[in-house]
Image: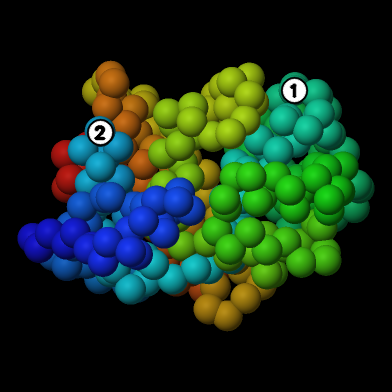
Amino acid sequence: MTSFVHTIGAAGLALLVAAGSVRAETIVERPDLDALFVEQGTPGTFVLLDVAADRMVVVNRARAETRMVPASTFKIANSLIALETGAVKDENEILPYGGGKQFVKEWERDMGLRDAIRVSNVPVYQEVARRIGPERMRAMVERLDYGNRQIGTVIDRFWLDGPLEISAVEQARFTARLAQRKLPLSARSQAIVRDITRLDEANGAVLYGKTGWAGTLTPKIGWLVGWVERGEAVHAYALNIDMATVQEAPKRMILVRAMLSRLEVM
């Protein structure tokens, strides 16, 4: 393993401190773990941020630092913004999907945020975004410092088709802040979204996360981002892979669990 700590001149450091942009993590590259992507037959990247140690493990660093459309991983932020602005009352308010046949059969019913995030209901979250509206959405994406912070002009498609983009490194930093309840939002909004993104618990560790698939773009990208809590320890993670078809979706969780196991997190 090789450790990298970025250094800059004193003048540059002063400017970054003034801007609140200093990133002090130790970056550890793990090319050996690329074998797990080879086993699954797909290129990809994985990032793991140990919050207490301020240490980031990265597999395929260039890709980890490349911004991509977040697809349904933006449902984490969309949920937070909806709750914070009052566009949605709580996780149980029933939201309309709009009717008609959908890409996924489970999306063909009205539901609250808890069920909608679990089945990744795109039409329900498009309704949520329309309720929030462009002005509030733009302001809140800025406040959250989410990726490139660009929502464009199409309020119910910007996280699916762009222009919003975020890197795996940025995803891990974002979920780490949510895990620590340190986003610039109310404790209530963060508590609800933490609760609805809880996926599993095993051996004293709790796994949180959200999948995504940018299936309308080339290349088609699959995501899984979130964090693991074990006692007081928090490890935020982000994975993205090339995912040509929805049939490859299980590879995301297979890879995340394999990475977390190899890195002795879960």
SS of the residue under disc 1: loop
Indicate whether 188 appears above or below 2: above
Q: Kindly indicate whether the residue at mark 2 contacts the one at mark 1 (C-beta within 8 angstroms).
A: no
**Spot occupied by residue 55 in the image (x, y as percentages of width and height):** 23, 46
Residue at 27% of width from left, 27% of height from top?
A: 233
Q: Quadrant of residue 246?
A: bottom right
C-alpha gap between disc 1 and disc 2: 31 Å
For the view shown, which residue lies furthest in the left direction? 1
SS of the residue under disc 2: loop
Q: Amino acid at mark 1?
A: Asp
Q: Amino acid at mark 2?
A: Ala
The circle on residue 101 is none
The circle on residue 90 is 1
Q: Quadrant of residue 92?
A: top right
Q: Which sits in the foreground, 6 or 91?
A: 6
Residue at 75% of width from left, 53% of height from top?
A: 138
| Residue tagged 2 | 52
Residue at 55% of width from left, 58% of height from top?
A: 147
Colour scheme shown: rainbow
Q: Is any atom of residue 85 visible in this view?
A: yes
Residue 262 located left or right of residue 97: left
For the N terminus, the quadrant is bottom left
**Spot occupied by residue 99 in the image (x, y as percentages of width and height):** 91, 47
Residue 145 located left or right of residue 97: left
For the C terminus, the quadrant is top left
Q: Residues within 10 Å of mark 2 (few under 14, many from 20)?
A: few
Indicate whether 65 appears above or below 176: below
Q: Is any atom of residue 256 visible in this view?
A: no
For the view shown, which residue lies furthest in the front direction? 11
**Spot occupied by residue 234 in the image (x, y as percentages of width and height):** 32, 32
Q: Which sits in the foreground, 108 or 242?
A: 242
